[in-house]
Image: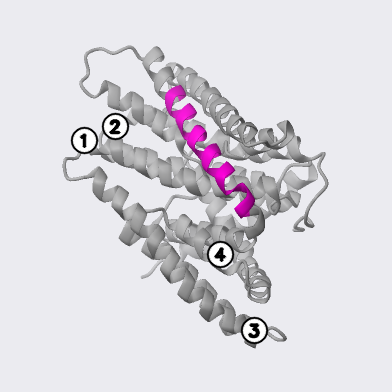
Amino acid sequence: MESYSFLLIIAIILLSTKVLGLASGKISMPQVVGALIAGLILGPSVLGVVEETELLAALSEIGVIMLMFDAGLGTDLKELKTTGVASFVIAIIGVVVPLVGGMGLYMIYFPNNGDAMYMLEAVFIGVILTATSVSITVETLRELGKLQGKVGTAIMGAAVIDDILGIVVLTVVSSFTDPNVKISVVLLKILLFFLFVAIVGFICYKLFKILNNQYRDQMHRRVAIYSLSFCLIMSFCAEHFFGVADITGAYFAGLLLCNLPYVRQYVSRRVSIVSYMFFSPIFFASVGVKTDLRGLTPSLLIFGLLLLLIAILTKVVGCGLGAKLCKFSTHDALSIGVGMVSRGEVALIVAQKGASCGLVSESMFAPVILVVIVTTLITPILLKLVMSDRKSAEPAVQA
């Protein structure tokens, strides 16, 4: 008989993320913190009542795609144009500094014992720290009413570039363990992806512009369906054909439609309803469900705590320095650095790929997971602390 237990699991996730989300809001923390803690409690680290399944993984993936699509829709293109160069500089320094920091810590804490893979393992620990997951930052900025504007746009732009740079670095390192991977091919695919976005974006922008003008007085539901389908297709093409993260494709899909005011407003409202009621809570909970901290030994715990400190400092210092070089104020530079701290699902994906290539041992996986979950939890809190004294650019989201 077919099991319907997944219905109960989904109900538990939705209820627990909302209850703990509301509880975190009561103590002046972003609701996303409560949702992440809910996943951690439900997962193997605490209660173990929820296990990662193919269904939950798929729903979680849709959740983060919709979240990034909505973030793209909410991007201010005028601000993006003014912060484009800044985003690139922030991303470059925000990759180099964590890479060197993670690599250096590994080499100091674990001296080389003659292992031929030692240097690659050290480099890969640094590669994991280069990852940035802005999906949680996006949610926090939205709650604080800071998503639109110079700081929020710089973070989003830098994160997209950071994702591309992370793929390049990951490919370079993994190519040394797999002779079938060619760096030149990967770089070519990335260039082709941007060409694909430009061509498809131009065509789809013209088509949606017709809808924007035709239905400006009263939008039809078909417009939302067309837009969401476009998002999913862009996500699929990015991952499947070009090896670029699907969330990057989703963000660009939203970015291509953000300059159409009537379409953007209508689609964003419809997507948000579906996302926040179902898919996004599952995504946030899945981050905790994937985490199992039971394998931490005292030595690995110390290394994990040091790695956590390096992970936070290198992103704040690296991205903050990049922002200062681009003439951001000290406060805004600090906000940008903090906004790039979260590693989230991106670092999990990188770590899993490293494990499959033999670059991360099973014993090393626990400290990495510790860094992922703590940076994911601490980013919303730090963002609220550094940005709470600024006047909101948009209304906060109510539960």
Do we see residue 243 in this rendering? no
Residue 128's label in the rendered image is none
Q: Quadrant of the N terminus?
A: bottom left
Residue 359's label in the rendered image is 2
Residue at horizontal 51 percent and vertical 20 percent from the top: 306
Q: Answer with the quarter of the image where residue 332 lies.
A: top right
The residue at which mark 1 appears reads as 177
Residue 14 appears at what percent x and percent y?
61, 58
Secondary-structure class at tag 1: loop
Name the mark nearer the viewer: 1 or 4.
4
Disc 3 or 2, which lies upstream in sequence? 3
Disc 1 or 3, which lies upstream in sequence? 1
The residue at which mark 4 appears reads as 254
Using the numbered discs, state the Cα–Cα distance from disc 4 to disc 2 in whole angstroms. Answer: 35 Å
Using the numbered discs, state the Cα–Cα distance from disc 4 to disc 3 in whole angstroms. Answer: 18 Å
Disc 1 or 4, which lies upstream in sequence? 1
Q: Amino acid at mark 4?
A: Gly
Secondary-structure class at tag 2: loop
